[in-house]
Amino acid sequence: MVYTAQKHLKPKALSGISDEQIDQHWHLYEAYVKNTNEILEELGEAESGSHHWSELKRRLGFEFNGMALHEYYFGNLSAGSSLSPQSALGEALAERWPDIDAWHNDFAKTGAMRGIGWVILYHEPATGSLFNWWISDHEVNHPAGLNPILVMDVFEHAWMVDYGAGEKGKYIDAFLDNVAWEVVEQRFKDSLDGHVPARF
Ligand SMILES: [Fe+2]
């Protein structure tokens, strides 16, 4: 399996997140794709059980999830979309939290936590539960059996071109103004139907 950068996911003309910011971020994503391919190739050649092989196995989670999470992230960004309160997702958010604004506030506050990483709205198909989940490193703290519905990158590289240090809140507001809700709603429907939402 050779992975390729999913060019059709690259967002354009967002409001509050510049094309230059997206361009620089995209280069980082391409590096994750490249590194994932390199590790998979090296794993095929390394001696099973060797130290080198073991380190490649450990490294794969970082590079693979770095690739996959950026695909979910870029794929859930577009300008001019809005969440319908009558959609399946809108109703589920308002059921899990007091209302959609309360979910929005909790998601933003999770992103504003000190540190870098990811905030992911996860759906657990087995129970119907929804979580705004914090992840520090790509490969750590992902809940088993849950599906990513909305993914927000809160590494500083996601906003430092547009906003300076200490301005993460402005980026989070901009991110939430640019959610591709039709994509996010489709992911939720896929999860309700028992499928892992497609990354691309
Ligand atoms: Fe990123």
Image (cartoon, grey):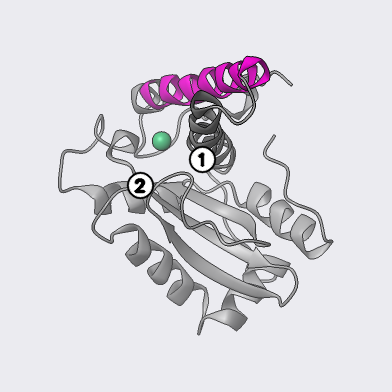
Residue 79: mark: 1
Q: Is residue 186 left or right of residue 168?
A: right
Where does the image place residue 62, in percent across and percent down from the top left?
Answer: 48, 37
Q: Amino acid at mark 2?
A: Val
Query: Compared to 141, does 163 lie above or below?
Result: above
x then y, percent, for residue 146 = 65, 62
Q: Name the residue at 67% across, 39% down.
A: 199
Quadrant in the picture for residue 129: bottom right
Query: Which disc is residue 154 wearing?
Result: 2
Disc number at residue 16?
A: none
| Disc 1 secondary structure class | loop
Q: Residue at x 54, y 17 (%)?
A: 34
> Does 110 appear above or below 126?
above
Q: How many marks?
A: 2
Q: Foreground residue, 1 or 123?
A: 1
Residue lying at 57% horizontally and 44% vertically, measured from the top left: 76
Q: Is residue 73 magenta?
A: no
Q: Nearer the viewer, residue 48 or 137?
A: 48
- Residue 32 x/y as whole percent: 49, 25
Which image quarter has ligand 1?
A: top left
Mark 2 secondary-structure assignment: loop
Count neighbours of disc 1 (C-alpha within 10 A) and say few if under 14, some if 14 to 19, many if 20 or more: some
Magenta segment range? 24-46
Query: The N terminus lies in which quarter of the figure?
Result: top right
Name which residue type carries label 1: Ala
Residue 87 appears in view: no
